[in-house]
Amino acid sequence: MPSEHETHTSDTHTSDTHSSAPRLLEQRGVDTIPDEERTSSPRDLVSILLGSNLCLGVIVFGWLPVSFGLGLWPAVTSVVTGTVVGVAVTAPLALVSLRTGTNLSTSSGAQFGVRGRLIGSVVGLLLALGYTALTLWIGGDVIVGTLTRVAGLPDTGAAHALAYAALAACTVVGAVYGYRLLLRLSKILAVSMTALLALGLIAYAPDLTAAAPPDTPYLLGSFWPTWLLSAVAAGLSGPIAFITLLGDYTRYISPRRHGTRPVLAATCLGLLVGLLLPQLFGTYTALAARAALDYAGPLVDAAPAWYLLPLLLAAAAGSVGNAGLMLYSMGLDLDAIVPRATRPQATAIAACVATAFVFLGHFVWDAQSAMTSFVLLLTAVGTPWAVITTIGYVRCRGEYDAEALQVFNRRAKGGSYWFTGGWHPGATLSWTVGAAVGLAAVSTPLYEGPLLALTGGVDCSFVLSGLVGGVLYATLEARAPARTPVRTPERVPRVRP
């Protein structure tokens, strides 16, 4: 059987390389998935977006508004508003990989060039890296805190290190086995984690208050700037984290059997429910636990004794499910950057880097500042890439040359998306300008951009970065005819929604 490396460098497959029966250990890297292997459905997409997000790594984002000084309803409205806006921007990207049969970073080569799509690979790698580390970090802290209360485990650095390592090891197994194992796990988590969170609503109800914790002033000094910061950092950042991940799942859905409307509807439903349910649970429990400067410790301390075991299960299983998908995506992005590496090799390397970030998160960085700065900076950089890729999808009407997208992976040259040395100058320039404007307009606890003086101190980074990058790209492309690649026998025909 050819390795993932061989799928990059050769078009020759033996007759038994991919049988009709699905295999648990995924054999594919970022090469194009043949239609006969694309056996998932929109319902599977909802399951994976719901099950994988019901974890403490997503729940903790519901704590951010409370740590910023917002009470119950301001926190809820900011999270809901940001999430809805983020889903509107992010969900259409799911349709790209439905057409191309490969992940989104590779698919973006149609706009950025087969080498320029490395921009998407790097952005995706950083997003997945940060969220993987965050999930392992918060999950490990809750596990140690719970075992301290239940079994008297000493709350030491060694205990935290052991918990992080154990979670990371389990995560690597799921990520290496790949999509089908992670899909099965997500289906189980969608049911079990929903039940555990429902129990949590009962467990923390006696201590719930609508007011922010005492001595927690507005982070930005007044209500509206802080509310807007919460909408971006806690709400919008959730969907934006999926700008390169959605294609990892929709590439396994066949456009022969499923139109664009069911896939888009499933993406919107999965993102909305999968993100709002855990994040609002995080807001609920943060207020009940009076969690101002830290979330994991107060969450465990405020839990009644009967909820400690469910909390331990939620921290372990949910963390493995979410981090597994993020690490799987990291492996694909690194595999796309370094075509000589196989997907399992790239996944193992990514796991080591993510685990190192977990230790930095616990022993070096301040939780609130690190989380807020990370999501705001990457949102500013990632939004223009997402907007440009979406505009490109609309311009080509969902028609892609799947073979030409794989040129870089095969270490070849030429094809429909070679442009100028493998880069599309207009798309690359548009993303660069958009990202630069976003970084200049961002406001984080660690860095404030120079454009804040023009926006009244309000963080408009994601709006400005997406608007500038998108408008510039559309303007430059308006002067060139839309590129619709010639249909080839290998490509999947377009279907009407």
Image: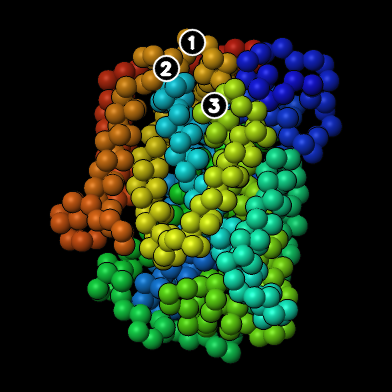
Q: Nearer the viewer, residue 61 or 167?
A: 167
Quick one: SS at disc 3?
Answer: loop
Image location (x, y in percent) of residue 22 = 81, 34
Instruction: Choose mark 1 or mark 3, whichever is in front.
Output: 3
Q: Quadrant of the N terminus?
A: top right
Circle 2: residue type = Gly
- For discs 3 and 2, the disc positioned in front in the rendered view: 3
Measured along the vertical axis of the image, is residue 469 above or below residue 395? below
CB under 8 Å between callouts 2 and 1? yes
Q: Is residue 34 left or right of residue 88?
A: right
Mark 1 element type: loop
Position in image of residue 336 (x %, y %): 55, 28
Q: Say which residue appears at 51% left-offset and 52% top-offset.
A: 357
Q: Are marks 1 and 3 in contact (CB under 8 Å)?
A: no
**185 sits to left or right of 159:** right
Q: Residue 413 bears which disc, if any?
A: 1
For the residues marked 2 and 1, what is the alpha-carbon distance in whole angstroms? Answer: 8 Å
Q: Quick check: 379 above or below 135?
A: above
- Name the residue beneath numbered marker 3: 338
Q: Residue furthest left?
A: 454
As displayed, is residue 318 above or below residue 257?
A: below
| Residue 392 in view | yes
Label 3, residues with CA under 10 Å away: few <14, some 14-19, many ≥20: some
State whether residue 462 is above or below residue 261.
below
Q: Nearer the viewer, residue 275 or 302?
A: 302
Disc number placed over residue 422 in the picture, else none: 2
